[in-house]
Image: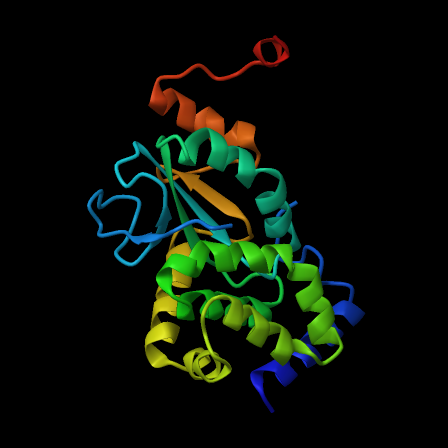
């Protein structure tokens, strides 16, 4: 049985039990760089980091590419965070995987992103969130292998390279380390967000700003100021 056969069977059972949607989830073109641990507090060596390496704030997101709630956050909240804070050099963003929702699907998708060239990481993760429903459907219909191979090719991997990478001990060890970081920080659902090590009470832009803006020395927006 291939990993994709296992994924398809598991997904069908999960759907049949009506547990897929938010079982373990709460409510393009970027480049990545290796975190060298220069801040030593909120990043670890090998982290995938987007934004100014010297930004005063580090936002770490633990997410699952198989989590509908994570896909919704990346569609509805992340663009504002990126435009207002990452692109302006105020926040550096770190993505770490956490295998919530359908674990086998999450693990396959995260390893795919790890296997791809490093400068394709954030593009790959974003594409998996965008195509999440199509991937669910492909796995349910037994076409998961081709769906993932297409994603791999979009990131510069051949089918052979992708299949070999799924069982690469180095990739597996790296993935296990990153997910263990989440366990050690008390992550229980996805997405879970930390701003300079402080867990946000929810995943809204307002919750992120409530921690980030005082660090930046900027006022927290009020409904009145938003309306002006």
Residue at the farthest left position: 38
Quarter of the image that includes the N terminus: bottom right
Front position in the image: 191 or 72: 72
Q: How many numbered badges does the structure rendering display?
A: 0
Q: Residue at x 47, y 43 (%)?
A: 193
The x and y percentages for residue 111 are 46, 70
Which color scheme does this rendered protein use?
Answer: rainbow
User: Which image quarter is the C terminus in?
Assistant: top right
* As drawn, 198 above or below 186: above
Whether residue 121 appears in this view of the structure is: yes
Residue 75: quarter of image: top right
Q: Is residue 113 left or right of residue 41?
A: right
Is residue 143 rendered to the left or right of residue 174?
Answer: right
In the rendered image, the vertical position of residue 41 relative to residue 178, given as above or below: above
Q: Does residue 22 appear to the left or right of 171 in the view shown?
A: right
The image quadrant that residue 58 belongs to is top left
Viewer-closest of 171 and 192: 171
Placement of 38 over or under 106, stated as above or below = above
Give coordinates of residue 149: x percent, y percent.
56, 76
**Residue 41 locus on image (x, y percent):** 25, 44
| Point 35% across, 65% down: residue | 177
Query: Looking at this view, is 15 or 137 the one in front?
Result: 137
- Residue at image x 78%, y 64%? 18
């Amino acid at each position: 049985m291939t990993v994709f056969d296992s994924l398809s069977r598991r997904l069908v059972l999960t759907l049949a039990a009506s547990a897929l949607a938010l079982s373990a989830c709460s409510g393009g073109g970027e480049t990545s760089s290796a975190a060298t641990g220069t801040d030593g507090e909120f990043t670890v060596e090998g982290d995938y980091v987007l934004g100014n390496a010297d930004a005063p704030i580090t936002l770490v997101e633990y997410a699952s590419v198989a989590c509908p709630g994570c896909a919704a956050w990346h569609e509805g909240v992340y663009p504002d965070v990126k435009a207002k804070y990452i692109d302006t050099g105020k926040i550096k963003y770190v993505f770490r995987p956490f295998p919530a929702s359908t674990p086998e699907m999450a693990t396959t998708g995260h390893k795919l992103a790890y296997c791809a060239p490093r400068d394709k990481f954030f593009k790959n993760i974003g594409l998996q969130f965008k195509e999440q429903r199509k991937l669910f459907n492909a796995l349910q219909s037994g076409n998961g292998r081709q769906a993932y191979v297409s994603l791999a090719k979009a990131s510069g991997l051949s089918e052979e390279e992708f299949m070999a990478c799924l069982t690469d001990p180095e990739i597996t060890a790296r993935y296990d380390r990153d997910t263990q970081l989440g366990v050690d920080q008390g992550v229980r659902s996805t997405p879970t967000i930390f701003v300079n090590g402080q867990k946000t009470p929810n995943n809204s832009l307002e919750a992120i700003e409530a921690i980030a803006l005082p660090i930046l020395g900027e006022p927290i927006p009020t409904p009145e100021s938003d309306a002006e």
